[in-house]
Amino acid sequence: MWCSTMRECRWPTEKTILKHNSKLKRAVPGFVPKVRFEEGIRMTLNHVLSHPELQVLDPEFDAWCDSVIASIDEVKASLKTRFAGTV
């Protein structure tokens, strides 16, 4: 497990991935959040950390995630090369 307490799971503010939900609102026009992003993450982590049965490794899913990340990295590298110096 990558963290065992909420204190270990905190992200520095400057590293926050989602600062606002404008992209989500464009993708899902009817979306209205019921909890703030930070609270939703806190609730999710507390739930997973309090249920050991949810903390089981899944090598097949991990391999799939790794392949998705690798594909994204390849596309990013390709785009950087293709559009280098055009911005």
Image (cartoon, rainbow, N blue to C red):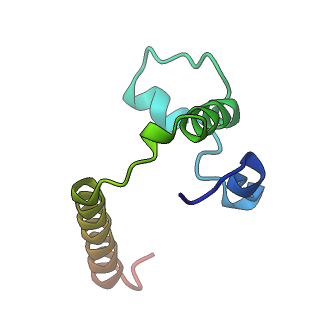
| Residue 69 location (% of width, % of height) | 32, 65
What's the residue at 75%, 59% (across, down)?
Answer: 12
Residue drawn at the location 33% of the way across and 72% of the way down: 73
15 up-or-down from 78: above or below:
above
Using residue 58 as the reference point, say whether residue 29 is left or right of it.
right
Left or right of 2? Residue 73 is left
Q: Name the residue rendered at 67%, 60% in the picture.
A: 15
Residue 29, compared with residue 14, is above or below; it is above
Question: Where in the figure is residue 34, as x and y percent of width and height?
Answer: 61, 16
Total marks placed = 0
**Quadrant where the C terminus lies?**
bottom left
Pick the front one: 66 or 83: 66
Q: Quadrant of residue 42?
A: top right
Determine the residue positioned at 57% across, 60% down. 2
Residue situated furthest front in the rendering: 52
Q: Which quadrant of the view contains residue 82?
A: bottom left
State the image coordinates of residue 44 (x, y, percent, origin top left): 57, 34
Percent x, y of residue 70: 28, 71
Q: Is residue 18 above or below residue 64?
A: above
User: Between residues 61 and 11, which one lies in front from this camera angle?
Assistant: 61
